Image: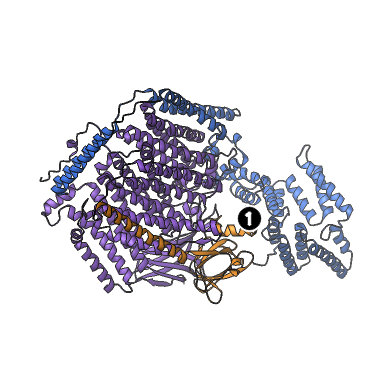
Amino acid sequence: MTRKQKRLSVIAGALAFLGAATGLTFYALGQKASFFYMPADLQAATLEPGQRIRLGGLVEKGTIVRGQGTEVAFSVTDMESSVPVTYVGILPDLFREEQGVITEGSFSPSGVFVADSVLAKHDETYMPKEVADSLKAKGVWQEN
Amino acid sequence: MVETGHFALVLAFALALVQSVVPLFGARTGNERMMAVGGPVAITGFALTALSFAALTLAYVQSDFSVANVWENSHSLKPMLYKVTGTWGNHEGSMLLWVLILMLFGALVAVFGSNLPATLRANVLAVQGWIGAAFLLFILATSNPFVRIVDPPIEGRDLNPILQDIGLAVHPPMLYLGYVGFSVCFSFAVAALIEGRIDAAWARWVRPWTLAAWMFLTGGIAMGSYWAYYELGWGGFWFWDPVENASFMPWLAGTALLHSAIVMEKRSALKIWTLLLAILTFSLSLLGTFLVRSGVLTSVHAFATDPSRGVFILCILTLFIGGSLALFAIRAGSLTAGGVFHPISREGALVLNNLFLTTATATVLVGTLYPLVVEAVTGDKISVGAPFFNLTFGPLMVPLLVVVPFGPVLAWKRGDLYGAGQRLMAAFAGALLAVLVVMMFVDGASVFAALGIGLAVWLILGALTDLALKSGFGRVSGHVMLHRLVGLPRSVFGTALAHFGVGLTTLGLVGVLSFEQEKILAMRPGETMEIAGYTLLFDGLTPARGPNYTEERGRFELIDADGEAESELVSSKRFYTARQMPTTEAGIKTIWPSQLYVSLGDPTADGGVVVRVWWKPLVTLIWTGGLVMMIGGAVSLMDRRLRVGAPSRGARPAAEKPSLGLPT
Amino acid sequence: MLAGRPRLFIENTMLFWVVAALLTFGASLAVLLPLASRPKADSTDAHDLEVYRDQLSEIDRDAARGLIGDAEAEQARAEIARRILRLDATGKSATAPRFAGAGRAIGAAAVLAVPLISWGVYATIGSPGVPSKPLEQRLAQNPAESSVEELVARAEAHLAANPSDGRGWDVLAPIYLRTGRSAEAVTAYRNAIRLEGATADRAAGLGEAIMSAAGGIVSAEAQAAFERALVLEEGHAKARYYLAVALAQEGRTAEAQAAWRSLADGLPEGSPWREAVEQAIVAAGSRLTAGESGAASGPSQEDIDQAADMPAADRTAMIETMVAGLDERLRQNPQDPEGWSRLVRSYMVLGKPDAAKDALDRGLKALGPATEEGKKFAEFAATLGVAAATE
């Protein structure tokens, strides 16, 4: 191989590699990025059962029910509508009524949101950003 | 004293402005005197910033609530250690620490750079001056820690309890040493672009700085990961959270830079690429600072965020990244490019490493910023989490790890792949054996888990093989080999250690991801549970009181096969009174290299408590590997060829020759 | 000592300006000295040459150790030699100083910029007049210069370390009372009495604190404390005053007025109590003439006196009508803590603990159990032996 050919083959190899990586990245973004919804957004959205989403809002007052052992059920609300959520595991320290929360998981065929993770930031003034933005847009929540 | 600190900070800002202009002008016009200004100004600027930082620390130690920052983040009853670490446990203080470290690096360049070409030194210090001036202005204008309260309250509001931890004492300074350390590489790159030439000394100078920054960043990330693991009580060590990605991207790019700088030093090739990497690495550090401080992305990590600060950092970001890349676009063409080389060679392997690492950096960048872009374009809110990164980052890392052992055993210029393969036969056999052992003897091991373990063993044995080959294993007698081993350059040890550390981390990751066991159950006092062959007895909850919190301590006993209590584990739910904030303290029992991790949940109606227990096999290796990588970096840094860029004039090369008494 | 604070302040500020001036001077020197010193000659090519020489010696070392073969070493040496040759070929472009005049101007500007920028910026954002205030120093400074808040914090810190210092509690108790920290005042008075022995002043103070904690209602406990004060010192003004208040609160306005009158007669000239007592007498008088109609009130002493002349059945009916009237008023207008207190007391007097308990629960609901008023109401009821339904 001449010097030029050598250089070209190296560049072609690198480009092919980068192309493959780019393809993989966008495929993964399409497949694995989960959309964020507030309960009121869900009526307009078309979700396939089992599709992973993030559901955010406030923990509705008086809806936290502790089942046997580690099961917990509660509702996430955005003051317009609310969605029942079940979760098995330990809730974050700052999980409280009327506090912002983000749950991640998917809907069961019966319409209950089965969360496999519940996030509440480790800060007492925490309001997840998406939740805060959406609530502010709805005029339900003001920053003090 | 407080106001002295404040004044010193303002003075440091004035000096940084001088440092930004005068040496640069001197270098442009060939004025030696003006070039010489950079050094003393950088050192004085560092001293003033240090004075300022000391004043703030003193205010924290003395609980001086006339300083608003102290009042907001401290409490007179807090233990002394956390009073001190509280200095950088908040936005303002941590930015001051950031600048302090930046100034420290500038001063180090001034002190150790006396044998650099004068124009290069002047330009580097000027660029450091720009960064310093920009961030000092940022602190003074938007995040001044020295805002005073004329009639101070008698008690402070306490530090976020989650940050009252020894991990916080070490993690941010280490991370910042890494982040900011790359500013030196950036300054060198920009200085080279300004001058329009890359000196031979350039690569030799940049490599130790990269190495030092990389070392601290490695330690900082490992420590942050361990801190999240035991402090948050979720048992997770990496969440692909934007804030974590913010520190991981400069690490990936920095690792690439570390390797490309070797090629540049040894082979005078990849010059322009290395320059670009140096710029990109620090740009990613700046981006990380922006992401963390502006709160544009949702993160599980708590930081006080403020839109006006975000805009300010965004301006700094645009100015530095845009400016340096524009300069690069203009000047890169005029720099002399290096030669091409054979793909199968040490430098070829290093290029492959760069290709993988930069692509991996890009995927992390895309995953981190994609939600931001989508929201700006379509208004949809999405989140990109672990599944995305597992799908993209994983496939990029695995082939890279597979080829890692080849790199050091290939020769420069023209390597012999077949020969290298032969030399690595032993390591390969060991890895294969590991795969078979895992498949046959470990219950429930998947093929992937076995291959993962095999990959880790391959990395570990590969690193050892490299050392064995270089010391002449099998070719010379044991005595001579030992002599040779001791006489090897430290950078060889550094490389081997770092690659060994990568292997350990891989082993830990595969262990936890494949063989972790988790149980969530409600336990009442006196009940037992079993996990991974261990029996845990729950003794019950007892209330206790700390200096600034109350807690419910859950005591567990680890029962051995004979039913004897072997050791105890305490996990607790704390309540910090000043901030009215609950936290969970995990109970961790290390059975090296694995850990038993117990986290308390809420009480149940029937008098029990929800308990989450994990068996985390090999988990400690994740961080041990990080530590070993760090030690590798330190050993490499001690190599005298790296310590001095250009040898001091007058020092005869012959005198540097170490007398090892080797048979020649 | 009074002049101590301003002088200290001036000294601190002076010291600060001196330090600031010294720092500025030092920083300006860092710019000035290199500009004024003699430059060293330097050539970039010489640096490169050093590097290449060093690399050559490195190759020799590696070859000697057997890290690289002879052929490889030879190749590497040749390459470095080529680089050295290239170095010689590329220009020897040592630049001579240009723009010497502009350089001098910029140098001078740089030296001046340091003090100008720093003092200018600091003047706009600094607070040179605010001294450092370490907590310990604030707590240890001359009491005359401290705020009440600081003094209390100091005393608290002292008492936390020496909880058996009765005198400390004695000093702190009235301060708590005055600053509205009634519950802490009660504790402080109790501790003072326990450690230092009872005096009329302490007992009366305790009564006042208990009363204040109960929202101004003289409970049985407070009454006992005031009576104790009278035992310890006959005619203690504060104790007598508040005992009369207790009478008035029970609706025995005439008796209260009489008690205040006799207190006023016995008060020495210039007593701080005179004004309060005289106002109380006037207020009681107007209440008596107005017949205590209108506002929410329980059966007054007159009503009861009147009732005493009635047949027993009529008497009970009358009282019950009045209480029912109060009850009805409170249903209409529940935001009346004093009315609720009277209602509970009335039901207890009538021997209807269940009705009292019901009134307590309704009152708590109306006032809100977590509010200050609600809490005081519940505490008052507790002194009558009525406890709220457990939540």
In this rendered view, identify the residue nearer to me: C14 or C295.
C14
Residue B161 vs B619, above or below: the answer is above
Q: Is residue A89 left or right of residue B216?
A: right
In the image, the chain rendered in purple is B
| Residue under pointer 1 | A142
Picture residue at 44% right of the left edge, 57% below the top: B366
Residue B389: tell me if it is visible: no
Mark 1: few/some/many CA within 10 Å (<14, 14-19, 20+): few
Answer with the quarter of the image where residue B447 lies. Answer: bottom left
In this rendered view, identify the residue nearer to me: C98 or A46.
C98
Place of residue C120 in the rendered image (x, y in percent of width and height, measured from the top left): 54, 30
Q: Is residue C275 left or right of residue B503?
A: right
Q: Secondary structure at mark 1?
A: loop
Give the color scheme: rainbow, by chain, secondary structure or one colour: by chain
Q: Colour of chain C?
A: blue
Picture residue at 57% right of the left edge, 61% below the top: A100
Q: What amino acid type should be assigned to the residue bearing mark 1?
A: Gln
Image label count: 1
